[in-house]
Image (cartoon, rainbow, N blue to C red):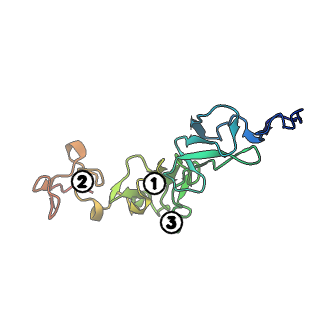
Protein backbone atom coordinates (compact mmCIF):
# COMPACT_ATOMS: atom_id res chain seq x y z
CA UNK A 1 0.00 0.00 0.00
CA UNK A 2 0.94 3.70 -0.05
CA UNK A 3 1.31 5.74 3.12
CA UNK A 4 1.21 9.56 3.46
CA UNK A 5 -1.28 12.43 3.69
CA UNK A 6 -4.18 12.31 1.26
CA UNK A 7 -4.12 16.09 0.69
CA UNK A 8 -2.16 19.28 1.38
CA UNK A 9 -3.36 22.88 1.34
CA UNK A 10 -2.05 26.24 0.17
CA UNK A 11 -1.68 28.54 3.18
CA UNK A 12 -2.14 32.33 3.45
CA UNK A 13 1.61 32.87 3.36
CA UNK A 14 1.79 31.21 -0.03
CA UNK A 15 3.35 28.01 1.21
CA UNK A 16 2.08 24.48 1.12
CA UNK A 17 1.05 22.99 4.44
CA UNK A 18 3.39 20.04 3.93
CA UNK A 19 6.24 21.22 1.69
CA UNK A 20 8.32 18.11 2.32
CA UNK A 21 5.46 15.66 1.95
CA UNK A 22 6.17 12.34 0.24
CA UNK A 23 4.25 9.15 -0.47
CA UNK A 24 5.85 5.86 0.56
CA UNK A 25 5.20 2.34 -0.67
CA UNK A 26 4.69 0.07 2.35
CA UNK A 27 4.20 -3.68 2.79
CA UNK A 28 2.12 -5.48 5.41
CA UNK A 29 3.86 -7.63 8.00
CA UNK A 30 5.24 -10.63 6.10
CA UNK A 31 4.14 -14.21 6.60
CA UNK A 32 6.64 -17.06 6.42
CA UNK A 33 6.51 -18.95 3.11
CA UNK A 34 5.64 -22.67 3.33
CA UNK A 35 8.35 -24.77 5.03
CA UNK A 36 10.22 -21.66 6.28
CA UNK A 37 10.54 -19.70 9.53
CA UNK A 38 11.27 -16.00 9.98
CA UNK A 39 14.60 -15.30 11.67
CA UNK A 40 14.90 -11.50 11.39
CA UNK A 41 12.54 -8.69 10.35
CA UNK A 42 13.67 -5.65 12.31
CA UNK A 43 12.18 -2.24 11.61
CA UNK A 44 9.31 -0.04 12.69
CA UNK A 45 6.03 -0.33 10.85
CA UNK A 46 5.10 0.51 8.22
CA UNK A 47 7.72 -1.62 6.48
CA UNK A 48 8.66 0.45 3.45
CA UNK A 49 9.82 -0.34 -0.07
CA UNK A 50 13.23 -2.06 -0.02
CA UNK A 51 12.90 -3.43 3.52
CA UNK A 52 14.31 -6.96 3.89
CA UNK A 53 13.20 -9.79 6.17
CA UNK A 54 15.29 -12.92 6.65
CA UNK A 55 13.91 -16.48 6.58
CA UNK A 56 15.32 -19.98 7.00
CA UNK A 57 14.10 -23.17 5.31
CA UNK A 58 13.16 -26.03 7.61
CA UNK A 59 15.07 -29.32 7.68
CA UNK A 60 14.69 -31.25 4.43
CA UNK A 61 14.16 -28.06 2.39
CA UNK A 62 16.42 -25.57 0.61
CA UNK A 63 16.08 -22.21 -1.14
CA UNK A 64 14.37 -22.52 -4.53
CA UNK A 65 16.76 -22.22 -7.44
CA UNK A 66 19.85 -22.78 -5.29
CA UNK A 67 22.01 -25.69 -4.15
CA UNK A 68 20.71 -28.11 -1.52
CA UNK A 69 22.95 -26.58 1.15
CA UNK A 70 21.49 -23.04 0.92
CA UNK A 71 18.82 -22.63 3.60
CA UNK A 72 18.61 -18.85 4.30
CA UNK A 73 17.02 -16.17 2.10
CA UNK A 74 15.40 -12.71 2.18
CA UNK A 75 12.00 -11.41 1.18
CA UNK A 76 12.04 -7.78 0.00
CA UNK A 77 9.23 -5.22 0.11
CA UNK A 78 8.67 -4.48 -3.58
CA UNK A 79 7.38 -1.38 -5.36
CA UNK A 80 3.96 -3.03 -5.66
CA UNK A 81 3.57 -3.23 -1.89
CA UNK A 82 4.01 -7.01 -1.85
CA UNK A 83 6.86 -9.16 -0.56
CA UNK A 84 9.13 -10.60 -3.24
CA UNK A 85 11.67 -13.41 -3.05
CA UNK A 86 12.21 -17.16 -3.29
CA UNK A 87 10.68 -19.87 -1.17
CA UNK A 88 11.68 -23.34 -0.03
CA UNK A 89 11.78 -26.54 -2.10
CA UNK A 90 12.33 -30.10 -0.86
CA UNK A 91 15.93 -31.27 -0.85
CA UNK A 92 16.37 -34.00 -3.45
CA UNK A 93 19.00 -36.64 -4.15
CA UNK A 94 20.43 -37.47 -7.58
CA UNK A 95 18.24 -39.69 -9.73
CA UNK A 96 19.19 -43.35 -9.43
CA UNK A 97 21.18 -44.72 -12.40
CA UNK A 98 19.13 -46.32 -15.20
CA UNK A 99 20.81 -49.68 -14.50
CA UNK A 100 18.56 -49.98 -11.41
CA UNK A 101 15.31 -49.40 -13.31
CA UNK A 102 12.65 -51.84 -12.12
CA UNK A 103 14.68 -53.00 -9.12
CA UNK A 104 13.52 -50.47 -6.51
CA UNK A 105 10.46 -48.78 -5.01
CA UNK A 106 10.73 -45.41 -3.20
CA UNK A 107 8.45 -43.91 -0.58
CA UNK A 108 8.80 -40.30 -1.85
CA UNK A 109 10.71 -40.25 -5.15
CA UNK A 110 14.15 -38.59 -4.77
CA UNK A 111 13.18 -36.21 -1.94
CA UNK A 112 14.86 -36.03 1.47
CA UNK A 113 13.61 -38.76 3.79
CA UNK A 114 12.55 -41.05 0.97
CA UNK A 115 13.50 -44.70 1.45
CA UNK A 116 14.11 -46.80 -1.66
CA UNK A 117 13.88 -50.57 -1.25
CA UNK A 118 15.91 -52.64 -3.70
CA UNK A 119 15.06 -56.17 -4.79
CA UNK A 120 17.23 -58.29 -7.04
CA UNK A 121 15.72 -60.18 -10.00
CA UNK A 122 14.37 -63.62 -9.13
CA UNK A 123 16.36 -66.86 -9.45
CA UNK A 124 15.64 -70.31 -10.80
CA UNK A 125 15.71 -71.88 -7.31
CA UNK A 126 15.68 -70.66 -3.68
CA UNK A 127 19.19 -72.06 -3.19
CA UNK A 128 20.53 -69.52 -5.66
CA UNK A 129 18.47 -66.54 -4.51
CA UNK A 130 20.26 -63.27 -5.36
CA UNK A 131 20.48 -60.71 -2.56
CA UNK A 132 21.49 -57.06 -2.35
CA UNK A 133 25.03 -56.70 -1.06
CA UNK A 134 27.05 -53.66 0.00
CA UNK A 135 30.75 -53.91 -0.79
CA UNK A 136 30.35 -57.69 -1.05
CA UNK A 137 28.38 -58.21 2.18
CA UNK A 138 24.68 -58.87 2.39
CA UNK A 139 22.74 -55.94 3.85
CA UNK A 140 21.23 -57.03 7.20
CA UNK A 141 17.98 -55.09 6.72
CA UNK A 142 17.55 -55.65 3.01
CA UNK A 143 18.53 -53.35 0.17
CA UNK A 144 17.24 -50.05 1.53
CA UNK A 145 18.84 -46.69 0.84
CA UNK A 146 17.69 -43.32 2.23
CA UNK A 147 17.87 -39.82 0.76
CA UNK A 148 19.58 -37.80 3.51
CA UNK A 149 18.81 -34.15 4.25
CA UNK A 150 22.06 -33.07 2.58
CA UNK A 151 20.91 -34.47 -0.76
CA UNK A 152 22.98 -37.67 -0.82
CA UNK A 153 21.91 -41.31 -0.81
CA UNK A 154 22.96 -43.47 2.14
CA UNK A 155 24.41 -45.92 1.52
CA UNK A 156 25.72 -44.95 -1.90
CA UNK A 157 23.70 -46.92 -4.51
CA UNK A 158 26.85 -47.26 -6.61
CA UNK A 159 28.14 -49.66 -3.94
CA UNK A 160 25.12 -51.99 -4.18
CA UNK A 161 25.25 -55.21 -6.16
CA UNK A 162 23.03 -58.24 -6.69
CA UNK A 163 24.94 -61.40 -5.78
CA UNK A 164 23.98 -64.99 -5.16
CA UNK A 165 23.25 -65.66 -1.51
CA UNK A 166 26.06 -67.62 0.16
CA UNK A 167 28.49 -67.38 -2.74
CA UNK A 168 31.88 -68.62 -1.48
CA UNK A 169 33.74 -66.50 -4.00
CA UNK A 170 32.52 -63.38 -2.23
CA UNK A 171 32.39 -64.63 1.36
CA UNK A 172 35.77 -63.49 2.58
CA UNK A 173 35.41 -66.05 5.42
CA UNK A 174 33.37 -63.44 7.27
CA UNK A 175 32.30 -65.39 10.35
CA UNK A 176 29.19 -66.90 8.85
CA UNK A 177 27.62 -63.68 7.53
CA UNK A 178 27.63 -65.12 4.04
CA UNK A 179 28.51 -68.82 4.16
CA UNK A 180 26.52 -71.01 6.51
CA UNK A 181 28.20 -73.75 8.53
CA UNK A 182 27.17 -76.87 10.38
CA UNK A 183 29.71 -76.43 13.18
CA UNK A 184 28.53 -75.30 16.65
CA UNK A 185 27.85 -71.57 16.63
CA UNK A 186 27.41 -71.62 12.83
CA UNK A 187 30.80 -69.95 12.24
CA UNK A 188 33.25 -70.87 9.53
CA UNK A 189 36.65 -71.90 10.93
CA UNK A 190 39.63 -70.47 9.10
CA UNK A 191 43.35 -71.03 9.20
CA UNK A 192 45.12 -69.01 10.34
CA UNK A 193 42.49 -67.55 12.70
CA UNK A 194 41.08 -64.13 11.75
CA UNK A 195 42.91 -64.13 8.44
CA UNK A 196 41.88 -61.72 5.71
CA UNK A 197 43.92 -63.11 2.80
CA UNK A 198 45.23 -66.53 1.79
CA UNK A 199 42.69 -68.22 4.05
CA UNK A 200 42.12 -71.93 4.29
CA UNK A 201 38.70 -73.19 5.38
CA UNK A 202 39.00 -75.94 8.05
CA UNK A 203 35.26 -76.61 8.20
CA UNK A 204 34.44 -79.44 5.79
CA UNK A 205 30.70 -78.85 6.24
CA UNK A 206 30.74 -75.18 5.28
CA UNK A 207 28.44 -74.51 2.34
SS for callout 2: loop
> Considering only vertical position in the picture, is 189 above or below 34?
below
Q: Nearer the viewer, residue 10 or 196?
A: 10
In the picture of the structure, the residue carrying the numbered disc 3 is 97
Q: Quadrant of residue 43?
A: top right
> Which of marks 1 and 2 precedes in the sequence?
1
Q: Are marks 2 and 3 in contact (CB under 8 Å)?
A: no
SS for callout 3: loop
Residue 128 location (% of width, % of height): 40, 61
Q: Are marks 2 and 1 in contact (CB under 8 Å)?
A: no
Q: Nearer the viewer, residue 134 or 15?
A: 15
In the picture of the structure, the residue carrying the numbered disc 1 is 153
Residue 112 lies left or right of residue 205; in this view the side is right
Residue 55 location (% of width, % of height): 57, 41
Kindly report the distance in space between the C-alpha atoms of the residues bearing marks 2 and 1: 26 Å
Identify the mark at residue 174; answer none if there is no mark. 2
Which residue shows up at 14% across the image and 65% down it? 198
> Which of marks 3 and 2 precedes in the sequence?
3
Amino acid sequence: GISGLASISCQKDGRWSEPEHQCHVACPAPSAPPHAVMTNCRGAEPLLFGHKCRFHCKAGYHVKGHANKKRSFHLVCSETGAWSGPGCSPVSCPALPPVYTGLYACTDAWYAGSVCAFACPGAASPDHEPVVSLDGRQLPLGGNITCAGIGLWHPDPERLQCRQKCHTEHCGWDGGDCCSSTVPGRFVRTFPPNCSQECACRDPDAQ
